[in-house]
Image: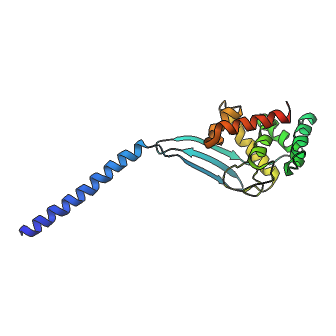
Amino acid sequence: MKNLLIKGNKTLAVATGILLGGAILNGIAKDIPISHVEANGSSDIASLSISTSRQIEETIVVKKYIPNESTKYTPDATKVENIRKYLAERNAPLADYAQEFVKAADHYGIDYRIVAAISVIESNGGRHTFKEYNAWGWGKTPFESWTDGIWTVSAGISKYYSKGLTTPELIAPYYCPPNAVKWAQNVNYVMNQIGK
């Protein structure tokens, strides 16, 4: 009987130690902010989430925009030419989509140069993409076409604008956190080269 009691106490002591250790580790883990970034895409929605172990800091949900061809809207020809010329000088595949950049920017109320400038910084205007038609380093998925990419990224950038983040300097800590300052400088430089 005495042996059973001793073995029972040892088992109880070990179990208590394991539970106490788990409780301590859990308490420590709650104090360490661990960043987690997710980007998902589907045919209807693309989303970007940035969160820590404590709270969700940022969630951007972008619904895919399908341009309505029956609309009689014509984008500013000077803006279209500014983007087309800048990208064409660099043999960028996106040069042929200059009108889409301006249409999407006007639709979402963002600077017409920013999405084109980001494409230059991230992929040399679509020349070196890591996923098909993804010239922006946007999430982990490819786009269906250049037009799809332009509209999806423009919609995403508009979410930053809606939070008052309307310049590359303000967007950079969320878009490119490891290299925010340099990224913002580069995007601004390209935007200024494209025109006003």
Q: Quadrant of residue 118?
A: top right
Residue sitting nearer the eye, 16 or 137: 137
Q: Position of residue 48 (x, y in %)?
A: 63, 47
x and y, in percent, of residue 2 in the image: 6, 67
Tell me where residue 170 appears, x and y as whole percent.
66, 32
Residue 159 is at least partly visible in this image:
no
Q: How many labels were placed on the picture?
A: 0
Q: Nearer the viewer, residue 63 or 195?
A: 195
Q: Residue sitting at 47 percent across and 45 percent down?
A: 53
Relative to 33, is 84 on the left or the right?
Answer: right
Q: Is residue 49 above or below residue 112?
A: below
Residue 50 in picture, x, y percent from top left: 57, 44
Dividing the picture into quadrants, the one containing residue 3 is: bottom left
Figure check: 72 above or below 11:
above
Say which quadrant the N terminus sits in.
bottom left
Residue at 78% across, 40% down: 117
142 or 128, which lies in front? 128
Task: Quadrant for the C terminus, please.
Answer: top right
